[in-house]
Amino acid sequence: MNVAIYSQLLGSLHQPLLETLFGALSRHKASIWLHPLFAPVFNLWQQNGGYSFSNINTSGAMPSNLDFIIIIGGDGSFLKAISEFEYLHVPFVGINTGRLGFLADISPDNIDTAIDALAAGRFVVEQRPLLELQPKIDEIKHPFALNEITVHKCDSSSMIVIHAYIDDKYLASYWADGLIIATPTGSTAYSMSAGGPILSPSSQNIIITPIASHNLTVRPLVIPDYSTIKIKIESRELNYMLSLDSTSVALHNPTEIEIRKSAHNISVIKLDGHGFFSTLRNKLMWGADRRN
Ligand code: NAP
């Protein structure tokens, strides 16, 4: 088994997690490549703890024969990792040290079982579409989003006006705080907070969800994922924010951007009991009712 491990900084609380994870991977004789962000953290931890795990590459280039990319962190780390491993069709799996863990859904208590399942091939791989931004913007290194692309007002209390077109046909002008263009994966993230619908990950759709639109007749809209969405932004303050998942940049008026489904998917590993509907019930309390 060849794995890569990505994590942002870990604290002392996470030391037992690392011991369990590297112990389980060693038992399966895994070859492990550490992302450059994580390698120094690992080296320090191994040195301070007196561990000597073998088969670990902390300096070389990323191998081409990876079976899995393991992310340690919350959903925020999961989103960041995807931008670090662009174009790589290796399945991602997340161990949740974060708060919610909707994407990174393996609990630290289940690491041993999870690594056994990975080694034995007891999992399914879900394909998750990405959104792609055009044209290329200098400040954005990775123009893809797993959750959503959002335009948002910046630095002021004034609304922005977002003129939206679908496949070059005029849809509406939103006078709002912002507009979220979300994937089915992103339907349980920001779009949900703004009143958008929840889509199952295999739905072939894109969601357009306004943020605080000052209009009684505007609602979130679901469109086919082969659509191209064109957006023109007007702001009295002459600037606005553009976000792709957790990366945000400030841009200036007037700007026109296009958003469409990318040709690249991300592969996400789902272990037994981690299907979308059980995650909805367990993490978002879907259907919670004191009578059940
Ligand atoms: P954050 O604001 O620190 O955390 C966002 C929250 O959303 C975290 O609890 C995160 O889970 C959860 N989350 C992320 N992706 C999810 C998904 N696909 N389904 C369900 N929950 C999800 O920001 P961040 O950690 O950098 O994550 C960036 C994301 O935050 C953006 O893509 C956007 O969707 C979301 N966001 C939400 C709002 C809002 O709801 N008002 C505002 C701005 C951004 P963990 O706790 O496991 O990290």
Image (tube, helix red, strand yellow):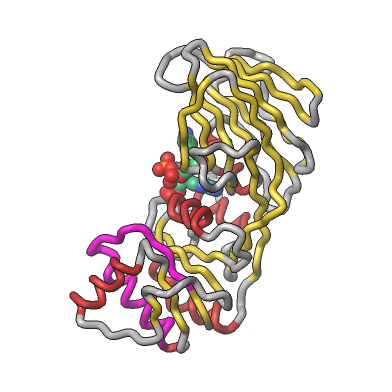
Q: Is residue 82 left or right of residue 36?
A: right
Q: Is residue 105 visible?
A: yes
Residue 223: percent from left, percent from top: 76, 36
The quarter of the displayed image where residue 54 is located: bottom left
**149, 58: nearer the viewer:** 58
Count every numbered label the image shows and give the total. Answer: 0
Q: Is residue 24 left or right of residue 277?
A: left
Residue drawn at the location 50% of the way across and 27% of the way down: 251
Residue 22 belongs to magenta span: yes
Residue drawn at the location 40% of the way across and 85% of the way down: 55
Residue drawn at the location 48% of the way across and 59% of the way down: 104
Residue drawn at the location 41% of the way across and 16% of the way down: 156
Assign the magenta stretch its main secondary structure: helix
Residue 75: percent from left, percent from top: 47, 52
Above or below, 129 relative to 161:
below
Q: Is residue 291 visible?
A: no
Which residue is most to the front? 138
Above or below, 127 relative to 272:
above
Query: Which region shows up in magenta?
Result: 4-26
Q: Is residue 291 left or right of residue 96?
A: right
